[in-house]
Amino acid sequence: MAKYKEIKGFTVQTLSSDPSTPSSIGQVYYNSTTNTLKYVSVGGASGGSWSSGGNLNTARALGAFTGSISAGLYFGGNTPPSTQKSEEYNGTSWSEGNDMTETARDQMYGFGTQAASISAAGVTGSTGNKSKLVELYNGTSWSAGTDNNTARQAGASAGKAQTAGIMYGGVDGSGPGNSNNKMTESWNGTAWSELADMNTASAYFTGGGSQNSAIASRGGARSTQCESWNGTSWSEIAENNTFRDEGACAADSNVAAIIYSGQLSPGTKTGATESWNGSSWTEVADMATVRSWGAGGTGGQSGGPTSALMAGGQNTPGVRQAATEEWTAPLLTVNTIGTS
């Protein structure tokens, strides 16, 4: 009798619990806690699509996005120059909120919700100076937080709450430069601590998930290499299908995510979207507006493969976008095959 690996090309994944958002139709996994073999039978990211949302009030790129498709927060970015502006999304339109309080920056890291978000590091576009400044948003205003350990820009972050997240990779240094790093820092709501490094130093890439379960899709190194974070260490996983840098990600965990948009080569943008189910990447519906550096690039938003947001970015050098697109995919049903 043929084995599952011989049929599908990979082994059945073992998970300690059912994923909060199963990522694709046909996904099969073994729940080691309940000793049950399960599969996903309906819906899936392959049935998802992009649709138009309300435009940003201020066209920009290189900003950060946290929250969800129905309650989002876009902050910072480059208009040019770098800006302190922040806007809130209600699922239909954007409204201007209070500005950030620290130095105007872009290419920041961020995670949390619309009512409680964090912004860390970034770069001042006019000077190229990297930052380790941290700001906290309470749903109304921004205030200074504890600096992270290493000044950097253009990496990725993951986290669903203002008090629990990680930032990883990027370009470091106190001034202009292009030294990629692989450092991971964790935030507990009060202080930052250094954790295990990524396997490969990366910048201008994307990722997302939670503090203990995240992914990284390399881009700036002209690679399709990807890594998975389990709360303790990074490990290499299957490569995505299309190389891109300066893209975006929405992830629930290291087994449920989509990546989208980005730059294929200098001057060539893409709207390609790929879904990750913990074993392989699948190409799904493209975005209407090809672009790179839109909000969502830091990976700090919720929703994963079932709901995501893209706002701003650029599709022509120097021309900033205000357009917003919303990704939605049907929820999946988990079925039990049998119990061992």
Image (tube, rainbow, N blue to C red):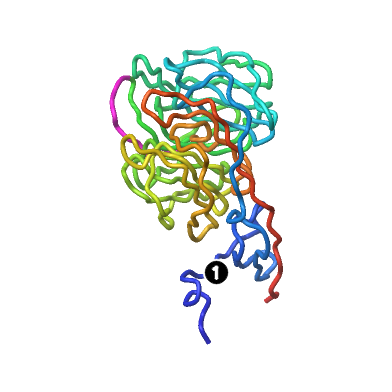
Q: Which residue is mark 1?
A: 12
Residue at 47%, 29% in the rendered image: 313
Q: Is residue 306 left or right of residue 147?
A: right
Indicate yes or no whether the magenta region holds residue 30. no
Percent across and percent down for residue 285 are 54, 50
Q: Nearer the viewer, residue 261 or 137?
A: 261
Percent across and percent down for residue 250 are 56, 42
Q: Secondary structure at mark 1?
A: loop
Q: Is residue 302 left or right of residue 218?
A: right
Residue pushed farthest bottom? Answer: 1
Q: Amino acid at mark 1?
A: Val
Q: Is residue 183 left or right of residue 212?
A: left
Would residue 80 be visible to someone looking at this image? yes
Residue at 69%, 26% in the rendered image: 115
The correct choice, above or below, for 200 with respect to 19 in the image is: above
The correct choice, above or below, for 174 with respect to 24 in the image is: above
Residue at 70%, 75% in the rendered image: 338
* Overall secondary structure of the magenta section: strand
Percent across and percent down for residue 301 are 59, 37
Where is residue 131, by image quadrant?
A: top left
Residue at 68%, 22% in the rendered image: 139
The correct choice, above or below, for 118 with respect to 310 in the image is: above
Percent across and percent down for residue 133 are 48, 20
